[in-house]
Amino acid sequence: MADLLEGLVISHLGKGLAIEHAGKTIICQTRRQLGVAAVGDRVLWERTGTDQGRVAELLPRRSVLTRPARQGKTRPVAANIDKVIVVFATHPNCDFLLIDQYLAVCENRNISAELVFNKIDLAPTPERDVILDELTRYQAMGYPLHCVSATTGKGLSTLTTTLLNQTSILAGQSGVGKSSLTNALIPDKALKTNTLSEANSHGRHTTTAATLYHLPSGGDLIDSPGVAIFGLAGLSEAQLAYGFREFQPFIEACQFNDCQHQKDKGCAVRQAVEDQSISQTRYQRYLKLKEKMKL
């Protein structure tokens, strides 16, 4: 055990892992019985050669985001996350159902979430006014909102502050500007990516999953290509309801412990919707996600 060193998983490279240790990148293989390591994992590893090693143990995680895998199982997307930054814009059309899915997962995984409305440099449209109106409900529930432009830099200083000393991941639809935001927050991202490629013994960059970068001002940002998908797999219907933050004060007041929050007798959540204490639109999206879980 004396020869084992602690490292941080910063990327998957082919079948190997890029581990950071003492400022250097080590390409490691993993023991078969180890399980699936995720970007953000802390691990114990042993040297097998110059800048090469083998991961011997996964250290306990404080949080993990997962996605559906084969045979009804789940696979980790990222580990030890403190904050999920949910990015959206006017175009492509803002998908509030996806936003609600992300927030429900975070609520159950002890991960904080913040909202980023990107591309605010574009000309105002009626659609933007509708989105801003809907966003006031999230702010009322305590979700911070950042209006930014990756193009002009507006709002990025405030966003940088909220990422300070945190391990964060950007999530959102394709086309909302996650890559542009990442490039703006990490000006030397291309250099760091090239360094990672050079560390790969195969001599080519084979990253197809998430990659962890250190922010210049402090903190880490996990960049995941395309949509950072972490699904509802692993959540029960009761956890989905709990994941809607405004439901929480009413859930315990329901007459039955296994209340489905639909047509159940004595449902305090449904009554709160009728009393307009809970948004009708959020409640309808909850029902859609509930159906999605069954599929």
Image (tube, rainbow, N blue to C red):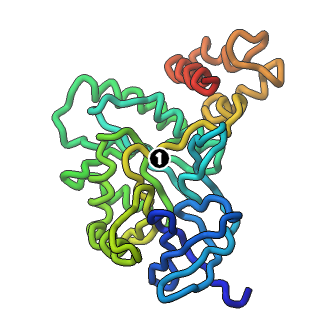
Please name the residue that numbered disc 1 is placed on.
114
| Residue at far left of view | 123
Q: Nearer the viewer, residue 25 or 29?
A: 29
Q: Residue at x 45, y 79 (%)?
A: 25
Q: Position of residue 5 (x, y in %)?
A: 62, 84
Splitting the image into 4 quarters, where does residue 145 fall? top left
**From the viewer's perspective, is 112 left or right of 35?**
left
Q: Position of residue 187 (x, y in %)?
A: 26, 67
Q: Is residue 87 above or below residue 9?
A: above
**From the viewer's perspective, is 72 left or right of 222?**
right
Q: Is residue 290 above or below residue 9?
A: above
Q: Residue at x 62, y 58 (%)?
A: 36
- The three-letter code of the residue at mark 1 reads Glu
Q: Residue at x 59, y 42 (%)?
A: 69
Q: Nearer the viewer, residue 19 or 96?
A: 19
**From the viewer's perspective, is 213 left or right of 36?**
left
Q: Is residue 21 above or below residue 38?
A: below
Q: Quadrant of the C terminus?
A: top right
Badge 1 element: strand
Q: Nearer the viewer, residue 213 or 134?
A: 213
Q: Position of residue 199 (x, y in %)?
A: 39, 78
Q: Is residue 80 visible?
A: no
